[in-house]
Amino acid sequence: MGPAMVSAFGQTMYMVAITMIIGGFAGLVVGLGLYLSRPGNLFQSKILFNLLNILVNIVRPIPFIIFIAAVAPLTRIVVGTTLGATAGAFAMCFMATFAFARLVEQNLVSLDPGVIEAARAMGASRLRVIRTVIIPEALGPLILAYTFLFIGVVDMSAMVGAIGGGGLGDMAIRHGYNRLNWEITYVVVIIIIILVQLAQFLGNWLAKKALRR
């Protein structure tokens, strides 16, 4: 069972890594778009804000296990199959994008508008304000939000296992729960707990460094 467990761990890390890179970046872009297009902000646009807001509000509340089934036709077109780690990562990227977008927007909204206004008063362009004021000021909270996303993505990877996506979730359900082999189930649980704890520790450390810079 050792090699199978190692393989399942590798599949989980593959799905999580792809989702954190693609979903994390896309979520940052959508979240910035939400924040910047708000009324009175640097790139205010009622149409863009409402469009992004509606998209996030539609996708984010859908339970992920249902979302996987809902995007299955699209997954089949793009990936060629609805089974396996790549198909699972495809659905996870979508959900992670919209989940992280809202987290990014909420953290940016809490910024002190006076800092941005001061930068604008000194003649900084809008893009420069984003690069040198908004992102640096929100870096610590954004790192914590990204850490929170990681934990959610690990949770998603386990659910993907329930419908043939492979990974630790599949191992715990197919080889553990279905065969009443509780030892496998508990080993998977311990691996996931360690993984999440390490990510939380790293995220807290990086956020603390960013806040004290």
Image: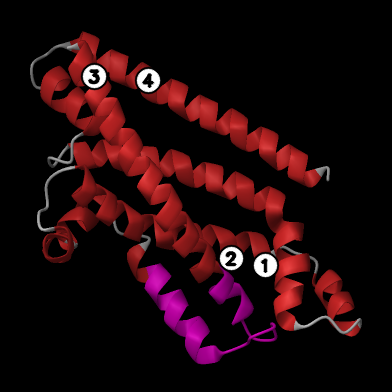
Tell whether label 2 touches label 4 (CB within 8 Å).
Answer: no
Residue 10 visible here: yes
The mark total stands at 4
Residue 173: x %, y % from top left: 16, 27
Q: What stretch of residues is rendered in magenta?
A: 32-57
Residue 191: x %, y % from top left: 37, 20
Does label 4 or label 2 sit earlier along the sequence?
A: 2
Tell whether label 2 touches label 1 (CB within 8 Å).
Answer: yes
At label 4, which amino acid type do we have?
A: Ile
- State the CA–CA distance, disc 1 to disc 2: 6 Å
- State the CA–CA distance, disc 3 to disc 2: 38 Å
Q: Residue at x 17, y 64 (%)?
A: 78
Residue to which mark 2 is pinned: 105
Disc number for residue 191? 4
Given residues 158 and 202, the one toward you in this image is 202
Residue 16: x %, y % from top left: 37, 41
